Amino acid sequence: MNQDRTGAVNEAAQRLSPKIVAFLRDMIAIPSESAGERAVVERCAAEMRELGFDEVKIDGFGNVLGRMGSGPRVIAIDGHLDTVGVGDRGTWTRDPYGGVIENGVLYGRGASDQEAGVAAAVYGARIAKDLGLLEGISLWVTGTVMEEDCDGLCWQYILREKVIAPEVVVLTEPTNLAVYRGHRGRMEIEVRTQGRSAHGSAPERGVNAVYKMAPIVADVERLNESLAATADPFLGKGSVTIAEIRSTSPSLCAVADSCTVHLDRRLTRGETRDSAVKEIEALPSVKAAGAKVTVLSYERATHTGLVYPTDKYYPTWSIEEDHAAVRAGVEAAAGALQRKPDVGKWVFSTNGIATCGLFGIPSIGFGPANEIHAHTPDDQCPVDHLARAAAFYALFGAAYLEASRTEKAR
């Protein structure tokens, strides 16, 4: 990579670091749980306009999209603006919406997951424009919504409704400044047993659905252990766990007439929606109980009021380490970090389940902060990560075009 260009990018990113920090603190100060992102979307759009983006728009789903450059090669840098809630405030040692900075670390809900990535991407696009790095490129920064509630649904809307059509996507979820190239998929499954109520004083007159569920719970635990046999060398093993169990009954003095468990199923390479459902249906206890197995659906309105239904199936995805997008990511990261970056994968799920998993668009990840702090009361991002990430986003487009040319010449 051209050292003069890299030096200029890093210098610009460091110079703009205080503004990136201020922007991130503004976003953290705005509560923005899924379906309640309107205010933070408008704040992000205002920052894009202030920085002179060539186009800024909010789509029907409620995502904000800003474009720098007008070339034919369309690249998207994505980050979601919604966060999880704060939970029990007593577990926080700092104001979750205060954007407190201590010892070079910025704390607050969304700092790691993942408004820091959005803040750095917005400024990275400005740096790329200022330094002439967008020749032939239309660079879109997308501040997406509802990811925490239903990852990838925002991109299902963007791509199906033809809002934009990128050829490659960079996901700004936290990677601790490593380049990531995939993660396991997931799905949400319910298993329901049917019973028959009777008065609690004479339970033998009824059929207790909880008792029918008990051997299923044990079988699910054993199934998780057996999934180690199908582990993928890169993504690891699939997993299944019971996230919730509930029952119904006419009263607390009656036999339970239904019982339902909610399964969190993580999918490794080679596992599919159908294979995961068949595994559950094939469990001896499920067969014996005549239990019903269902893949759940999602139909919650966004902050614009739009309902965009989808099944809760989020496919596994990964791209190979020698893919042009990964090579470009490594090149851009080396320039931003002044060292060779690590290459890995996320433990959790991202919008990549849609961009790459559903639609086959090559996607990689690079983001500030460490994913271990996501959803915790210590949610945080090192301040110095912001400038480094902004430099990466500024450098990626040109690196990708060069890597694409090299790939075609092979």
Image (cartoon, grey):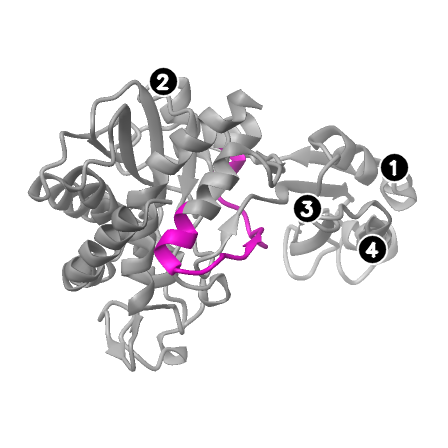
Mark 1 — residue? 282
SS of the residue under disc 2: loop
Disc 2, disc 4: CB below 8 Å?
no
Among the two numbered marks 3 and 1 on one chain, the one whose residue lies closer to the N terminus: 3
Query: Residue at the spot x=35%, y=17% of the render?
Result: 162
Q: Which residues are magenta?
A: 332-354
Q: Quadrant of residue 131?
A: top left
Instruction: From the image, tell me which residue sits under label 4.
Output: 211
Q: Is residue 108 above or below residue 399?
A: below
CA separation in Å, label 2 and label 4 = 47 Å
Query: Few, some or many C-alpha atoms within 10 Å of disc 3 (few <14, some 14-19, many ≥20)?
Result: many
Amino acid type of disc 1? Ala
The local secondary structure at tag 3 comes to strand
Please indicate, yes or no, whether residue 306 appears anywhere in the rendered image. yes
Q: CA distance from mark 4 to mark 3?
A: 23 Å
Image position, residue 164 (x, y; %): 32, 22
Label 2 belongs to which residue?
Answer: 161
Q: Residue at x 45, y 69 (%)?
A: 376
State which tag comes first along the sequence, 2 or 1.
Answer: 2
Earlier along the polypeptide chain: callout 2 or callout 3?
A: 2
Please tell me whether residue 143 is drawn above or below residue 106 in the rendered image: above
Q: Which residue is mark 3?
A: 265
The one nearer the camera, 152 or 232, is: 232
Residue 101 among magenta residues = no
Is residue 108 visible in the rendered image? The answer is no
